[in-house]
Image (tube, grey):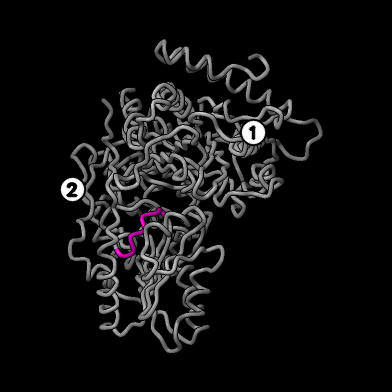
């Protein structure tokens, strides 16, 4: 009945091959006169999600998370992950080969400084590391009395015999009715920023910025409509786009050539050399430009400056068309999710559902909208203890049957031409424990605190992050991930520069879309997360205020499981927020679903106090 077409449930990690691969790598680096190698989860664009041919870290270690890096020395090796991946890394990686290190405890630089022998040579691929990253690693090596050495080709590529070919996904034009701004207008704004930065040209190394600028989308990266390409935007004159011509139809090429010189990827390095030879100042994105780009320019005689790519913020502030598209995508997605949740409530008590069943069912409901282009990321469907793995991905090996007395955590999203969605709901199966209900309610209180926040213009996500954690902190618990991330418009589900995170200092601006997703995770037992997407909008203005005020409009429309709420722990204002939210869900989504789902929706959104 249900099937997943955009997702698979195979275990991508081949742990049985890890010992031989690590041994082969050690042999290769020894032959090159090196004592170790850095292996990041990265490609030439510093993408979060990678095409198969760039998955070096997963191929070598078995770890398939979206962030991490390894250091392999002659006698020991370490894998560095953040708090989202502690459990996953421990399950996927051979402990006898790799020490799993939490970056909040020990950074890779500190580990290198402590463990690298004096006079050692540590190799790195300059096409996979930013200049700032290389500088920190070089300092760590120097402190150990060792040396950081650039390698070419990458030693992992040398031993990876069955490495997949680079992707050749087709490029499509992103229509103005979805983009909301013509590409030539965007280029005009970008040129103004290049001039303001006193640069002669901007290198666009982040593919999400490339496709946004030229109003195109691609299919090179799983679940994110990217084409892997570079661009150069000069302060004056025509930009150039470096993309494999095999990805372009004649119609797409014609449209792009009206905007830019379309060239092959192998011409990119030569173009940078020409800028250097002309003694030009080239602006590089500090977040995505790898060290190799800086080397090419400076070694050719040019000058580079590092800073934020101005396109990143332009893209994050959605225009009126993109905001309207986000509303439409959210309503469409919410109707599909409501159908799933009603189905789940009917079927889960029977005891026959598995995690894979649920992933396939939800994707099917989304596909039946007729508008789904892809899922936004592999659906996280964690029952019981699997819900405590923050970025859990179900495989045939890990697939669990959903049982009574457990919590089921479902984090999913869709890619539609008019918007990208991302939502998490935690659902009770059978009777939840009092601890589950208390923890869920504290997570909900934090979620509501973010949703109701009113803040002055210029406030950053770091200043709001504690709003979501305060109720968990008062119970002596917390969660090891950010409270929210930016979201693209039919683009990356994780988009910079803003986030609701304790370290993010980017001011929140009207038009930005972010997630609001506090959580709680009890290892070996259950996980809780409540996620809606929110739009930064004008807030209620106060007479005599020093600055204009902003607020959040909640975009996501789906019921929150009332069976998991302890009403006595909620304030009157929190209950009012929840009741108003559920009334809105009922009003906007009920007309979009079938009668059976509508009846279920009416029942589960009944106001607290009116039961």
Residue in the image at 32% along x and 66% along y:
274
| Disc nearest the viewer among 1 and 2 | 1
Q: Residues within 10 Å of mark 1 (few under 14, many from 20)?
A: many
> Dominant secondary structure of the magenta stretch?
loop
Judge whether 565 appears above or below 71 on screen: above
Residue visible at 51% across and 80% down in the picture = 114
What residue occupies the far bottom of the structure in this picture? 119
Label 1 and label 2: CA atoms lie apart by: 48 Å
Residue at image coords 31%, 58%: 55
**Along the line of sight, the residue nearer the viewer: 452 or 218:** 452
Q: Which residues are magenta?
A: 60-66
The residue at which mark 2 appears reads as: 246
Residue 442 found in image quarter: top right
Q: Identify the secondary structure beneath mark 1.
A: helix
Locate the C terminus by quadrant.
top right
Image quarter for residue 281? bottom left
Q: In this rendering, does residue 301 appear at all? A: no
Tell me which residue sits at (28%, 34%) in the image: 4
The answer to whether residue 359 is visible is yes
* Pointer 1 or 2: first along the chain: 2
* Residue receiving disc 1: 448
Label 2 CA crowd tier, 10 Å (few <14, some 14–19, many 20+)? few
* Quadrant of the image occupied by residue 569: top right
Give percent across and percent down for residue 32.
27, 82
Q: Position of residue 250 (x, y in %)?
A: 18, 39
Which element type, helix, strand or loop, lies under badge 2? helix
Q: Does the magenta segment cover residue 497?
A: no
Mark on residue 606?
none
Q: Are marks 1 and 2 in contact (CB under 8 Å)?
A: no
Q: Compared with residue 50, is residue 609 higher up or lower down, i.e. above or below?
A: above
């Amino acid at each position: 009945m249900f099937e997943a077409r955009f997702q698979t449930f195979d275990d991508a990690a081949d742990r049985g091959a890890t010992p031989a691969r690590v041994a082969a790598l050690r042999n290769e680096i020894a032959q090159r006169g090196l004592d170790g190698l850095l292996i990041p989860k990265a490609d030439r664009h510093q993408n979060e999600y990678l095409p198969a041919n760039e998955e070096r870290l997963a191929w070598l270690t078995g770890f398939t998370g979206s962030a991490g890096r390894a250091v392999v020395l002659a006698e020991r090796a370490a894998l560095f992950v953040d708090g989202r991946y502690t459990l996953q890394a421990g399950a996927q990686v051979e402990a006898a080969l790799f020490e799993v290190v939490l970056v909040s405890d020990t950074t890779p630089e500190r580990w290198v400084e402590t463990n690298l022998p004096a006079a050692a040579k540590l190799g790195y691929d300059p096409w996979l590391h930013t200049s700032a990253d290389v500088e920190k690693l070089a300092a760590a090596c120097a402190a150990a009395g060792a040396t950081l050495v650039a390698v070419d080709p990458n030693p992992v590529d040398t031993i990876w015999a069955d490495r997949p070919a680079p992707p050749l996904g087709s490029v499509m034009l992103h229509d103005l009715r979805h983009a909301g701004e013509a590409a030539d207008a965007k280029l005009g704004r970008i040129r103004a920023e290049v001039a303001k930065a006193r640069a002669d040209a901007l290198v666009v190394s982040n593919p999400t910025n490339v496709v946004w600028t030229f109003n195109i989308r691609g299919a090179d990266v799983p679940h994110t409509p990217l084409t892997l390409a570079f661009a150069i935007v000069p302060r004056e004159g025509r930009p150039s786009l470096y993309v494999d011509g095999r990805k372009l139809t004649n119609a797409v090429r014609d449209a792009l050539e009206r905007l830019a010189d379309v060239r092959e990827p192998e011409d990119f390095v030569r173009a940078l050399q020409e800028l250097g030879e002309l003694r030009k100042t080239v602006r590089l994105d500090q977040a995505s430009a790898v060290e190799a780009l800086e080397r090419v320019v400076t070694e050719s005689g040019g000058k580079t400056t590092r800073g934020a790519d101005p396109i990143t913020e332009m893209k994050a502030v959605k225009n009126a068309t993109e905001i309207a598209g986000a509303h439409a995508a959210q309503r469409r997605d919410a109707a599909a999710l409501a159908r799933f949740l009603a189905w789940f409530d009917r079927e889960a008590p029977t005891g026959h559902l598995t995690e894979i069943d649920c992933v396939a069912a939800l994707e099917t409901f989304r596909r039946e909208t007729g508008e789904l282009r892809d899922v936004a990321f592999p659906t996280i469907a964690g029952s019981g203890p699997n819900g405590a793995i923050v970025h859990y991905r179900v495989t045939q090996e890990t697939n669990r049957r959903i049982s009574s007395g457990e919590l089921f955590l479902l984090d999913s999203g869709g890619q539609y031409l008019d918007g990208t969605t991302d939502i998490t709901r935690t659902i009770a199966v059978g009777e939840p424990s009092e601890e589950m209900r208390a923890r869920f309610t504290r997570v909900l209180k934090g979620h509501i605190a973010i949703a109701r926040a009113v803040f002055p213009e210029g406030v950053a996500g770091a200043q709001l992050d504690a709003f979501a954690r305060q109720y968990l902190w008062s119970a002596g618990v917390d969660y090891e991930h950010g409270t929210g991330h930016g979201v693209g418009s039919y683009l990356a589900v994780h988009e910079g520069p803003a986030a609701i995170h304790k370290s993010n200092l980017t001011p929140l601006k009207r038009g930005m879309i972010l997630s609001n997703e506090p959580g709680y995770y009890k290892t070996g037992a259950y996980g809780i997360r409540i996620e809606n997407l929110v739009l930064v909008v004008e807030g209620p203005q106060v007479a005599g205020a020093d600055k204009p005020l902003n607020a959040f409009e909640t975009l996501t429309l789906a019921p929150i499981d009332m069976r998991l709420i302890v009403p006595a722990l909620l304030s009157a204002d929190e209950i009012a927020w929840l009741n108003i939210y559920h009334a809105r869900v009922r009003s906007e989504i009920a007309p979009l679903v079938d009668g059976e789902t509508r009846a279920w929706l009416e029942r589960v959104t009944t106001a607290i106090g009116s039961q």
